[in-house]
Image (cartoon, helix red, strand yellow):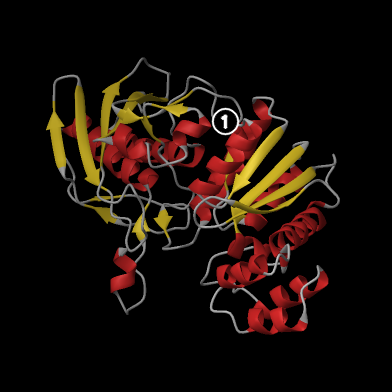
Amino acid sequence: MTRSETRSDPLRRGWTTGACATAAATAAYQALLTGEFPDPVTVHLPGGQTPAFALAVEERRADAAMAGVVKDAGDDPDVTHGALIRATVRFAAPGSGVGFRAGPGVGTVTLPGLPLAVGEPAVNPVPRQLMREAIARVAAAHRGSGDVTIELSVDDGARIAEQTWNPRLGILGGLSILGTTGIVIPYSCSAWIDSIRRGIDVALATGETHVLGATGTTSERVGAELYGLSGTALLDMGDFAGALLKYLRRHPIPRLTIAGGFAKLSKLADGHLDLHSGRSQVNLDTLADRAAAVGGDADLAAHIRAANTALHALELARAADVPLGDAVAEAARDAAKALLRGSELPVTVDVIAINRTGTIVGRAGPA
């Protein structure tokens, strides 16, 4: 159970890793100039908000200062919730401006296609800009030059990063410092959708011609084994089929395989682009009609309309030797092709539907 599932009041917003890193860097630079750490430390976010952050750790040395902030993701089920984000600030050569280094637990970019050059620390553009602006404010207030190197680190970040897209995107060694607004909105889904887009960017940059969009780990394993795909060809689309397809329409890759559970693909077949159970539902009437269209009799259709779940409907159809899985896969493929229509280059689509055990229960080849 997630934190949010235990609450009945409105979900509490939190702060991104970028906002926390900015707070830590602000405090560390002020301490480097004045000898004193501001606690709490206030930061300025792109939307005009000015939250204050308490420091969890601080250390002043002759040539550097370090401050750390514990990330509070609010009620979002974020794997980085509770992570300690540290910024160590050192003086740099006059005129050099603000530079960034990856410390322990922060990743390094190793593949093209991301908004950062290969070899750069995985500190995204907006957090970099927030930190540059924060350094400039502190420099103006305390007569500093603003020429510093900021080394960012995250305690246990390498382990936490294993639960993210980073290894697949070629970000190795730890987490990314992320955020465009500084604020985490619970279940906004923006981070996942952004990861899908970055995954497509990396696939294009590394020359992939066949990618797999999967709803989960089991469907990803089945599709990857079937076609021999790995690494940057694998896109964890989760429930966000629409986000995947819309971005591919603007940034086409020659071939797309969609793999997913039968129930989720039945929703895509009905035109739903968000496959989450809280935002779209399986239509048993449509499943009954699809079964009838591929040979099912009136009795089977009636039983499917009264089924408990999509998988129950599938079991009824399979017992009657009616290829409902294939029919759903074909309709899902056609829905995907319709959304990809108008792309600059054609995208060939095929679909694989599986059951809970990972058995393929339906397939649709390219139209």
Foreground of the two, 175 or 329:
329
In screen coordinates, is 366 left or right of 132? Answer: right
Q: What is the quadrant of residue 290 in the picture?
A: bottom right
What is the residue that sits farthest to the front in this orientation? Answer: 320
Callout 1: helix, strand or loop?
Answer: loop
Query: Residue 258 at what x, y percent from top left?
Result: 67, 48
Compared to 212, does 263 lie above or below?
below
User: Pointer 1: residues within 10 angstroms few (<14), some, or many (20+)?
Assistant: some
Q: Amino acid at mark 1?
A: Ser
Foreground of the two, 339 or 10:
339
Query: Residue 12 at what x, y percent from top left?
Result: 34, 67
Residue located 15% across and 40% down the image: 57
Question: In which quadrant of the rendered image does the N terminus lie?
Answer: bottom left
Query: Is residue 210 visible from the viewing direction of this image?
Result: yes
Foreground of the two, 25 or 226:
226
Query: Residue 356 at what x, y percent from top left?
Result: 50, 57
In screen coordinates, is 71 left or right of 211? Answer: left
Q: Look at mark 1 in the image and give the residue it sits on.
A: 230
Q: What is the quadrant of residue 52 in the picture?
A: bottom left
**Count of labels in the image:** 1
Compared to 366, does 270 lie above or below?
below
Residue located 24% across and 40% down the image: 27
